[in-house]
Image: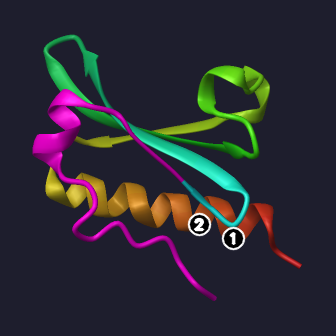
Amino acid sequence: MEKINLDGMVSIPYLKKAVFTGSHKGMCFLLRSQTSGEDMLLQAAAWPGPFNFSATDEEKKVYQEFAFSEEGLLEAVDWLNESYEKEHAL
């Protein structure tokens, strides 16, 4: 199965300043920084397409938070792949 691979497309320095959005075979997703107290976290969200984040009902979105680091970014991509597999399992 083809997996989401964001190597070279998004980085922690990029996410300090911007939100990254994408889609994979009908599943839309975003990655963004979130502040929790004094800590910065990486938030991932996934939802069924075709609509963008703001046009999609909140109950259709799933969220997960990770460490704001390169390792956290890799874990977020793994989570997005797991979310896709769960939603599209036969």
Please tell me how crowded label 2 is: few (under 14), some (14-19), or many (20+) other residues with Cα within 10 Å: some
- Mark 1 lies on residue: 85
Regarding mark 2 in the picture, which secondary structure is present there? helix
* Residue shown at the point (82%, 74%) measured from the top left: 89
Please tell me how crowded label 1 is: few (under 14), some (14-19), or many (20+) other residues with Cα within 10 Å: few
Q: State the extent of the magenta-drawn residues as a range.
A: 1-22
Reply above or below: 37 against 47: above
* Residue shown at the point (62%, 48%) measured from the top left: 28
Residue 21 as seen in the image, left or right of residue 1: left
Q: Amino acid at mark 1?
A: Glu
Q: Amino acid at mark 2?
A: Glu
- Mark 2 lies on residue: 82
The answer to which image quadrant residue 61 occupies is top right
Reply above or below: 55 against 24: above
The answer to which image quadrant residue 88 occupies is bottom right
The answer to which image quadrant residue 71 occupies is bottom left
Q: Position of residue 67 (x, y in %)?
A: 24, 43
Q: How many marks?
A: 2
Give yes or no for contact between labels 1 and 2 (Cβ–Cβ under 8 Å).
yes
Q: CA distance from mark 1 to mark 2?
A: 5 Å
Q: Position of residue 76 (x, y in %)?
A: 39, 55
